[in-house]
Image: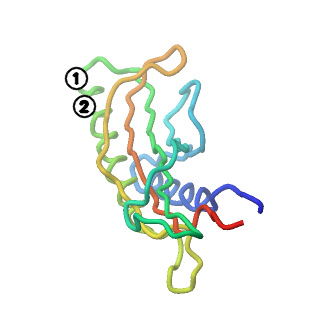
Amino acid sequence: MTTVAWDGWYKIGDLLRQAGRDVVPPLDFVRRGIPTSVPREMIRYWYTGTEDSPFAPGHTFARTQVGIKLMVAVFLPMSGAGSPEADEALDDRIELLDAAIQSALWSDTYLGDPDTGANSAIGIEITGSDADVVQVGSGWVRSLEVPVVYAIADRHTIAR
């Protein structure tokens, strides 16, 4: 039996690129993986583990239903911050990106077409978001984290 990486990653990247295009000015840097520095505005996303599927909790003797956990994060450099106008602009940008990202992810909860079987998930769970100021590398950035769980059918085959 061969195990392969989940095929939903590229679809999530496409949705996040759309979210970046939906704000003004557009945010066009979207990449998978945790950043080690933040030289520019970016949307990043990465794998954070698994949990029981929030939509199909239960297992059979042959298969399990799991949730693939990922983190979607926005990082905005804080250069120029400190004035009330700059601080408000960063806060507004984080709020707009939060709405754009969640809207984009909710727009394709199955990551494909479940009617044709060309989907990578059976549902999505987004439980909120957190905005903060964090240090990445040697710089401080305004950040937004959106934890996401995609429910995956038949992820692990138990039968051998």
Instruction: Please rate how many residues cluster around mark 2, counting C-alpha atoms within 10 Å: few if below 14, some from 14 to 19, many from 20.
Output: few
Q: Amino acid at mark 1?
A: Pro
Q: Which residue is mark 1?
A: 84
Q: Which residue is mark 2?
A: 88
Q: Which mark is residue 55?
A: none
Classify residue 151 as left or right of residue 30. left
Which residue is drawn at the image coordinates 38% and 20% (left, top)? 80
Local secondary structure at mark 2: helix
Q: For this rendering, which residue is in front, 58 or 20?
A: 58
What x and y, as percent, mark residue 53?
43, 60
What x and y, as percent, mark residue 152?
51, 64
User: Relative to 101, is 120 above or below?
Assistant: below
Q: Distance of mark 2 from mark 1, alpha carbons?
A: 6 Å
Local secondary structure at mark 1: helix
Q: For this rendering, which residue is in front, 122 or 104?
A: 122
User: Relative to 126, is 132 above or below?
Assistant: above
Which residue is drawn at the image coordinates 45% and 40% (left, top)? 73
Which residue is drawn at the image coordinates 52% and 54% (left, top)? 17
What x and y, as percent, mark residue 143?
39, 32
- Quadrant containing the N terminus is bottom right
Classify residue 54 as left or right of residue 30. left
Question: Do the CB atoms of the residues marked 2 and 1 lie less than 8 Å apart?
Answer: yes
Instruction: Please rate how many residues cluster around mark 1, counting C-alpha atoms within 10 Å: few if below 14, some from 14 to 19, many from 20.
Output: few
What x and y, as percent, mark residue 129?
31, 43
Which residue is drawn at the image coordinates 39% and 51% (left, top)? 23
Residue occupying the far top of the picture: 138
Q: Amino acid at mark 2?
A: Glu
